[in-house]
Image (spheres, helix red, strand yellow):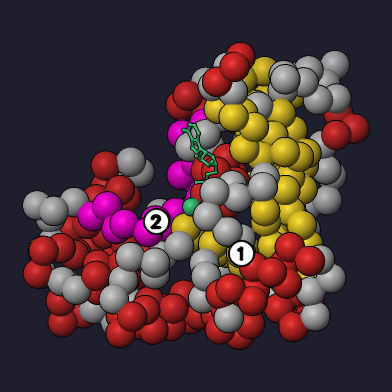
């Protein structure tokens, strides 16, 4: 499979923040090839929240990783904020792989929060949030600190800003991770099971920060098994299975009156 698309394949609709078209992802080659994404189409409008549900191994993490270019796609196109991710299209419509520096620049507009928090252990909460703006953007320490203080406050951790990750609960660490992602002023935030590693009593504080973020107008794609969050916060719910989107729609539709047997079956296990 090759990543060759003509200009007609590129969506022109700029109201969408994210436009995923016919995306395939194959890991490995020959007999060892694993076809993980099998032609995924997904649109997320600016300011909207899409929740992705689906069983383990269905390709949810791979899809997020393809959207922010942690993985190179095998076929199709990903457009974020009007930018074709990873490629430049010439006048004839042929796609050329972008230089890693250009890819890094595209990626810096997308924030990602993982199941595990990945904070720098030797830095305080505040220093973790200041790091990327100073190192990647060349912001002055003073300006970065000012912004980091605002973000730490926004996630409710002003009284913990000088603590090291090991001195924080999982929920607090995840809130720092969210503040750290926001410090780069992303246009889009991706969350990959952000509460799955947390003790049950810590899940709510993280979901509540995410809900506030959604209310503020952030465009978000959230992989989660938290059906309550999907119902309350999502504009769209997408159900994925075996590398394809099985069905999608407003939360009430997908969660309460799913059309597909596979969706019903999945929901009967998580609800
Ligand atoms: N780097 C990789 N190499 C080979 N297979 C992979 C790789 N990453 C993921 N996969 C496979 O892709 C499938 C989907 O994985 P993933 O996207 O993590 O699913 P989910 O997040 O829905 O649980 C799984 O079968 C997984 O083993
Ligand atoms: Mg996953």
Closer to viewer: mark 1 or mark 2:
1
Q: Where is 159 relative to 138, above or below? A: below
Give the residue at x 83% y 51%.
Answer: 13
Q: Position of residue 224 (x, y in %)?
A: 52, 67
Badge count: 2
Give the residue at x 67% y 47%.
Answer: 242
Q: Quick one: quadrant of the C terminus?
A: bottom right
Q: Position of residue 138 (x, y in %)?
A: 30, 42
Q: What segment carries the magenta color?
A: 103-119
Q: Is mark 1 within 8 Å of ligand 1?
A: no
Alpha-carbon span between mark 1 and mark 2: 16 Å
Q: Which residue is mark 1?
A: 53
Question: Quadrant of the rendered structure where residue 262 is?
Answer: bottom right
Q: Nearer the viewer, residue 130 or 87?
A: 87
- Going from N to C along the chain, the mark reached first, 1 or 2, is 1
Tell me if I can see residue 235 in this picture.
Answer: yes
Q: Which mark is residue 98?
A: none
Question: Quadrant of the rendered structure where residue 142 is?
Answer: bottom left
Q: Quick one: quadrant of the N terminus?
A: top right
Give the residue at x 90% y 32%.
Answer: 8
For residue 116: magenta? yes
Tell me if I can see residue 248 in this picture.
Answer: no
Q: Where is 7 relative to 54, above or below? A: above
Q: Nearer the viewer, residue 43 or 105?
A: 43
Question: Quadrant of the rendered structure where residue 12 is?
Answer: top right
Q: Which residue is mark 2?
A: 114
Give the residue at x 31% y 71%.
Answer: 198
Q: Position of residue 62 (x, y in %)?
A: 55, 43
Q: Position of residue 243 (x, y in %)?
A: 67, 45
Element type at mark 1: strand
For residue 139: magenta? no
């Amino acid at each position: 499979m090759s990543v060759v698309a003509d200009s007609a394949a590129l969506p022109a609709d700029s109201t969408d923040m994210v436009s995923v078209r016919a995306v395939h992802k194959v890991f490995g080659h020959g007999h060892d090839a694993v076809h993980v994404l099998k032609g995924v189409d997904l649109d997320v409008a600016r300011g909207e929240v899409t929740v992705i549900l689906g069983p383990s191994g269905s390709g949810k993490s791979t899809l997020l990783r393809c959207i922010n270019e942690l993985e190179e796609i095998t076929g199709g196109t990903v457009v974020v904020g009007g930018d074709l991710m990873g490629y430049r299209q010439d006048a004839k419509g042929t796609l050329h792989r972008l230089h890693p520096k250009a890819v890094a620049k595209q990626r810096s507009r997308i924030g990602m929060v993982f199941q595990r928090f990945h904070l720098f252990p030797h830095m305080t909460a505040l220093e973790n949030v200041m790091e990327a703006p100073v190192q990647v953007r060349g912001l002055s320490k003073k300006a970065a600190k000012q912004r980091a203080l605002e973000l730490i406050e926004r996630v409710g951790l002003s009284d913990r800003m000088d603590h090291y990750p090991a001195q924080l609960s999982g929920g607090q660490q995840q809130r720092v991770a969210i503040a750290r992602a926001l410090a780069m002023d992303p246009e889009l935030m991706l969350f990959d099971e952000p509460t799955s590693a947390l003790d049950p009593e810590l899940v709510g504080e993280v979901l509540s920060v995410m809900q506030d973020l959604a209310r503020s107008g952030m465009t978000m794609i959230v992989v989660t098994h938290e059906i309550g969050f999907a119902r309350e916060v999502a504009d769209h719910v997408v159900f994925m299975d075996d590398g394809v989107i099985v069905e999608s729609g407003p939360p009430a539709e997908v969660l309460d009156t799913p059309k597909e047997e596979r969706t019903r079956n999945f929901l009967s296990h998580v609800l």
